[in-house]
Amino acid sequence: MNIKEYVELTKQTAIYPPDTFLEYLTLGLASEAGEVSGVVKKYIRKDFPLEQAQEKLTKELGDVLWYWARLCDELGLNPEEVMEGNINKLLKRKENQTLQGDGDDR
Ligand SMILES: [Mg+2]
């Protein structure tokens, strides 16, 4: 499955009030990112082994992806352009040896 197909399929499970999509989706994205952190925290705490952490992270990262995809779609952003823009930015930072540091404009 490619990212455009995935974004299209997320429409089938996009159940939220249309007038609050921005709040709903950004809060959902932050919440799911927190769930990723929670799994890592519990893995570090040795609540479960690596294999179980990987299973949980697969699910939680999928949840992050769903909110990211819905935000792209609702905001009229091309998900491929978002991905390409991000990796191009990071590769340029690597080339300029500014990967580490602060600020968006490096
Ligand atoms: Mg989740």
Image (cartoon, helix red, strand yellow):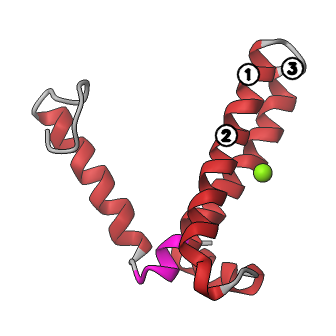
Circle number at residue 49: 3
Decide whether the magenta segment is chiefly helix, strand or loop: helix
Between 63 and 9, the one nearer to me in the picture: 63
- Label 2 – label 1 distance at C-alpha: 10 Å
Residue tagged 1:
41
Quadrant location, the C terminus: top left
Q: Determine if the C-beta at disc 1 is less than 8 A from ligand 1.
A: no
Disc 2 packing (10 Å; few <14; some 14–19; many ≥20): some
Q: Could you tell me which residue is drawn at 58 percent across and 74 percent down?
A: 70
Q: How far across and down, in percent of the image, does residue 96 sit?
A: 10, 33
The relative height of residue 78 versus residue 62 in the rendered view (above or below) is below
Badge 1 marks a residue whose secondary structure is helix
Amino acid type, label 1? Lys
In the rendered image, residue 25, in percent from the top left (x then y), is placed at 60, 67
Span of residues in magenta: 71-76
Residue lying furthest top: 45
Residue topped by disc 2: 34
- The picture quadrant where one finds residue 47 is top right
Distance Cα–Cα, label 3 vs label 2:
20 Å
Split into 4 quadrants, where in the image is the N terminus?
bottom right
